Amino acid sequence: MEILVSIDIEYIVQQALKDYFTIYCRPLPKNYDLPCLLVTQTGGNDEDTIDFYSIVIDSRAETEGEANEYLRKAIGVLKKVVQEQTTEMRHIEVNSSMSWGNDPVRPDLAMCSATIELYAHLQKETINKK
């Protein structure tokens, strides 16, 4: 039977950015390189053959300026990837950008976050009876 399934948006974002940035999907590994990004899906819904995803990208670095710059560049690359439509992602909207904070596990690190909405087509898959 042919079915439509949602994509793994965290993985798709990670793959889209991995050639330019150190990026992880949740959970953040115990040992990680700086600066780095963490992508987390925080919500979403579907409508017909389009899924809407809400994600947060956290940027961690030694300084606030470095975390901010790393995040802004990542958003720029993500916008370009969506524009070129080289992945399943078809539309992007940045809802909040560059909100400051400290890493909850390592308060000595600066953290900068952005909330992003992504839209993507569902994938067709074949599933066989058990």
Image (cartoon, rainbow, N blue to C red):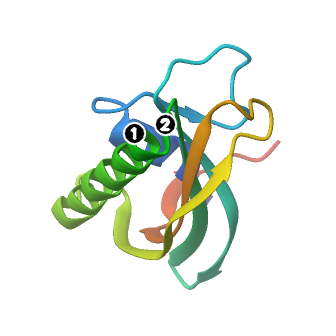
Query: Mark 2 — residue?
Result: 63
Q: Using residue 100 as the reference point, say whether residue 123 is left or right of it.
A: left
107, 120: nearer the viewer: 107
Secondary structure beneath label 1: helix
Secondary structure beneath label 2: loop
Q: Amino acid at mark 1?
A: Glu
Question: Is residue 4 among what the camera can see?
Answer: no
Residue at image point 38% right, 62% down: 89
Question: Residue 14 placed where, x, y %?
Answer: 46, 39
65, 34: nearer the viewer: 65
> Does the CB distance between marks 1 and 2 fall below 8 Å?
yes
* Residue 19 sits in quarter: top left
Q: How far apart are labels 1 and 2 at the CA level?
A: 5 Å
Residue at image point 20% right, 59% down: 80
Residue at image point 66% right, 57% down: 41
Residue at image point 77% right, 47% down: 129
Question: Residue 65 placed where, x, y %?
Answer: 40, 45
114, 67: nearer the viewer: 67
Instruction: Residue 66: give its label.
Output: 1
